[in-house]
Image: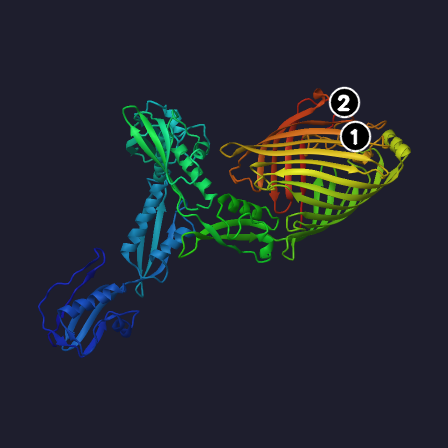
Amino acid sequence: MKLTRFFAVFVVLATGLLALPAQAYDAFTIDKIEAVGLQRLELGTVLTYLPITEGDELNARTGQQSIRALYDTGLFQTVALGREGNTLIIRVTERPAINSFEIEGNRKIKGDELDESIAKAGLAQGELYRRVVLDQVTQELRRQYFANGYYDVAIDSTVTDLPGNLVDIKIDVTEGSVAKIKQINIVGNEAFSDEELLDAFKLEESVAWKLFQRSNRYSKQQLVGDLEGLSSYYLDRGYLKFNVESVQVSLSPSKKDIYVSINLFEGEQYTISDVEYSGKLILPESVYPRLVRINSGDIFSRKAATEASSIISDALANYGYAFSEVRPLTELDEDAQTVTLNFFVEPGKRVYVRRINFTGNIKTRDETLRREMRQFEGAVFSRVAVERSRTRLARLPFVQEANVDTQPVPGTEDLVDVSFDITERPPGSVQLGVGFSGSQGFLVTGNVTHSNFFGTGNRVAASVESNEFSRSVSGSWTDPYATEDGISRTIALSYRESEQVIRFSSGFDTNTGNASLTYGFPISEFSSVRLGGGLEAVTVTTFPSSTATEVLDFVINEGSKFYNYELRTGIARDTRNRTIFATRGSLNRLNLDVTLPGSDLTVVRALYSNQAYVPIYKGLFLELNNSLSYVDGYGDTENIPPYERLFAGGSRSIRGFRDGTLGPRDTPFNNPFGGKLRTYAQTEVIIPTPLETDNKSTRLSVFFDIGNSFNEPEDFEFADLRRSYGIAYTWFTPFLGVLDLSYAIPINDQPGDELDRFQITFGTGF
């Protein structure tokens, strides 16, 4: 046997070192290359990674290069080079492949994101096994448990060798219990008590009476956030020298209790000695104090200074300076403990809009969206105009969401493109539905609606409805831009057969046909006027044995068939952020509808309604819903039609009282008859729910209602107003439509009042 000389370098994975010893050997020319130790790989695969081939010389330099190249492939645990004559022998140990990988016991830290990150690291079936990767994954998993407060977690990994150079990998996790904060101790605070400072923390000490408390679970990230909040708390109250000097977090021997100690330095409180404005101001200097509203003598607040900078920047953006920078600079007088606040303005160049683009509008024409713009191409950029344009787009019934992005035009300093990304909602629907209303009972409806007919924004609708007391059919067509100035036009036709106005009505039937043409005229960005006319044909049928005396008197005096010509007028101002489930803004509407002289009945109807949404505190806001209605006859009409009378009570006026039962009663049956005057006010405090804080599809509230209906205005007495309070829940459900639930407790109900504490109203389409 020939004496074989080997020069070898072994790669040790555990240390990551590539050892290349300088052994003495004779260089030689390679006649042939062979490989020893291959299991899954072919020799040809190995040769593709080698920087040398047959005919090349193997020496110290090329030997080191070859070993490094093979190791860098990641395919081998060890690599050694040997020689038999002029044959190069490559001895390798292939890395085993992963046959299976699983984690057990990880209930708290899991999910697709964890699985994806582990697979990305290389721990997946078919990947090559590397111990260092397994150790890294184990350490990262342990780090995540620590970050979530599980300090007594035990993580063990097992690698089982299998035939065919395969391994099974299993990680067993014993999570233990989460460590909870036993005490948070603040040291060095004199200006504010521990309770005041800890109120600003999201982390809390464990409290026995708080069931399912999660804020007592320690998190390093949350502690960092709370410390930043603590710093902001002091800086917003004038303590400019405030500093967190040290933080100690200690763990009990049981690894279940955590103690946090925060040492801080408050310093002195600073007030503002002067407010200055410098740089290129652009706007008249007298404008800035009205924008900022920070005065000498005020306690310095970093939050107020930052907000003031944003206000100035926004004001400049409305004059075309879209990329202005306003920096609040401070100059301290440590002896006097005052600060000079200087707003340094860098407006940049004035910017013009080159192009307005729309994306995502598959079914809607560009011109339908473009007519909503308040920012125009070629005009000076205005942030207010751009945002108002986005709001107008978002309020369209066929737009689900509208986002805006402003991008500088490459190669220029004074041009931007404004792009609106539109998410459309289905503009058309065919619905069959069932529902329930306290005043109408169970109802069946069918309607066809298209709010974006042929992408023009026109709305067409037709509907059929049937409930316990009435049947109706109607159709309408609305063109919101009948003229380029934004004048809208609505044409509507309807026919209704009704056996009674509400439940337990006064024993008469009505057949009503109506045709109308109404225009809407915008008079400002938020206000509009309506003007229109209509034709109405009504037939009243009475039943001598069951019809109320008041209805019979009306028919005797006025007749039973009427043809009326109606004038419709009104004015509205709407500043709500959404038309459904608004959270801020208000809607005020005043309507006056009159049947004109020459009609069989001359009646005037007046309505004022107000909705307002007022933020209160941290997601709480106030919703006000007020209404005042009046109807009366004039000229030869002494008695108003019974179907025009106004009813009170129920979910849409005064909850806790049965729908339509408050107010005047008829004779001799003592059924609700309605009045000429109705007033009510609903006051609700909207409470954010844990499942949804933006109030877009659910709404929980506590409410107070007050109101009633009166036969004549002079009958109004404050003592006669019915009052109730309770809790309500509204949900826009996928199956029941809008579901209204309320439970009300009447406060001053009188004998004869019909109560209905729990009320439900819903409607559905399918």
How did the renderer colour the structure?
rainbow
Residue 715, which numbered label? 2
Whole-number angstrom distance, CA of label 1 to CA of label 2: 17 Å
Q: Quick one: 313 or 630, which is closer to the camera?
A: 313
The x and y percentages for residue 317 are: 46, 44
Mark 1 is on which residue type?
Answer: Pro
On the rendered structure, is 409 left or right of 715? left
In the visual, does 590 lie left or right of 169? right
Disc nearer the start of the sequence (1/2): 1
Closer to us: mark 1 or mark 2?
2
**Callout count:** 2
Give the side of residue 457 with respect to residue 125, left or right. Answer: right
Residue 615 seen anywhere in this rendered image of the structure:
yes
**Vertical relation: 375 (above or below) 344:** below
Residue drawn 63% across the image and 38% down it? 573
Which residue is pictured at 23% across the width and 64% down the height? 71
Circle 2 SS class: helix
The quadrant of the picture occupied by the N terminus is: bottom left
Q: Quadrant of residue 128?
A: bottom left
Residue identified by numbered label 1: 672
Quadrant in the rendering for residue 65: bottom left
Viewer-proximal residue among 68 and 648: 648
* Crowdedness near tag 1: few (<14), some (14–19) or many (≥20) residues, C-alpha within 10 Å: many
- Residue drawn at 44 percent across, 30 percent down: 293
The amino acid at mark 2 is: Asp
